[in-house]
Image (tube, grey):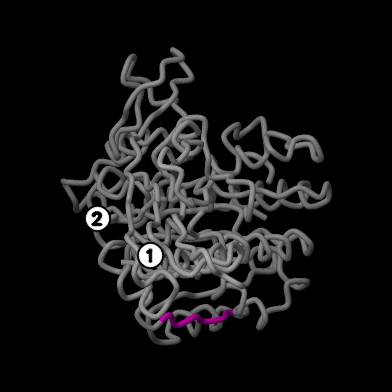
Amino acid sequence: MCETCGCNITPGNEHLARQKNSQGQDAVTVLKNLLGANDQVASHNREHFDLHGVLALNLMSSPGSGKTLLLEATIEALKHKFRIAVIEGDLETENDAARIRAKGVPAVQITTGSACHLDAHMVHDALHHMKLADIDILFIENVGNLVCPASFDLGQHRNITLLSVTEGDDKPAKYPVMFRAADLVLLTKTDLLPALDDFDPDRAEHYLRQLANPAPVLRLSAKTKDGLDAWFDWLRQELLTQRQRARHGQSLRPAIQSDGARMHAEMAAHHSSPATSEKHPRYREA
Amino acid sequence: MHELSVCQALISQVEDIARQHQAEGIRHIIVRIGPLSGVEPELLIQAFPLASAGTVAQDSQLIIERLPIRVHCESCGADTDAELNKLVCGACGDWHTKLLSGDEMLLASVELAKTENSYV
């Protein structure tokens, strides 16, 4: 969908993008997003999700922050209310998929070999092993890595970034690309906070706001179940709005590409109605 | 870490452009990268010879233009420069800002080499 429109041009860089070649050489100005092929497949994935009313969520964090444990607790609590499925991304092993399947929901494992992130093609291949018509919420557990997963759109509707309290509370400042892409930040393993004197949840949130990110921050422990209700409420609300959007033929891209999506919406304004969510004004219907 | 795959996507797009314009070679490839794109220019430069080997771009030069981080403040209206991990307004300090520039990863232009007697 972003093949030719140059949707990565923003008001700030437009003057650079339009520069002419003064030497009169045979230069072709292209202005293509370097991840164009990935983004095309991501849009394709998103169309499949929307067609089936599936809410697709991308979970990102460093290794060991508790993504799989959170999914286990979430499945246990919600599997009788919603049909849940999981795509697991790891460099090696089926371990995480096996843990999810043990909870009674379908899970597809993607082993990336040495690749540090999931991309839209891998997720597309995994979707061939799933029945989207039987799914309400699809969790995509990305490779544990706070760097690369933030750069690749998978077709998800929302990005969720986990930060465990055993890591530094300055992680958002150290990994700005990742935390800028978050639509929701979960501070996990909060049951350990009393034992730690160097993690201040307020400070973690402060560093997140310094990235101009208004995303909600929820504090929880998948082990003790503290704080899980707010997470479940967020999931219910997101599923509801996703179904409403899907009914109206609209979609949602995560924060990761908000600026490109905005330009795209403006350029497409003459043949569609790029409605803006009032609740989250930085998101645009793509 | 993922710069090789980004570079392969770059070469693939450059090959398409060369084909469309019946070019015999590529002189320069200009890409524009913002610090918030998640791509390291130095790693992209290292990956370039590997990704371009055996392609129409193998003798070309990769030129990277680094874009600044600029934000627009929704509170005071100012447009200011910002830092990678501090995207707050440079004028009033508020964090309710929108990114104007800095997360780009653009193939900006390609300089093609064509011969006079091309019959393609």
Quadrant (top left/top right/bottom left/bottom right) for the N terminus of chain A: bottom right
Q: Is residue A144 left or right of residue A50?
A: left
Residue A52 x, y percent position in the rendering: 78, 64
Q: Amino acid at mark 2?
A: Glu
Residue lying furthest left in this view?
A: A197
Residue that numbered label 2 is attached to? A167
Above or below for A201 versus B18: above
Q: Nearer the viewer, residue A127 or B56?
A: B56
Q: Earlier in the sequence, mark 1 or mark 2?
A: 1
Q: Nearer the viewer, residue A161 or A13?
A: A13
Q: Is residue A111 magenta?
A: yes
Q: Nearer the viewer, residue A232 or A107?
A: A107
Q: Main secondary structure of the magenta part?
A: strand
Provide the residue span drawn in magenta.
A107-112
Residue that numbered label 1 is attached to? A66
Residue B53 x, y percent position in the rendering: 36, 78
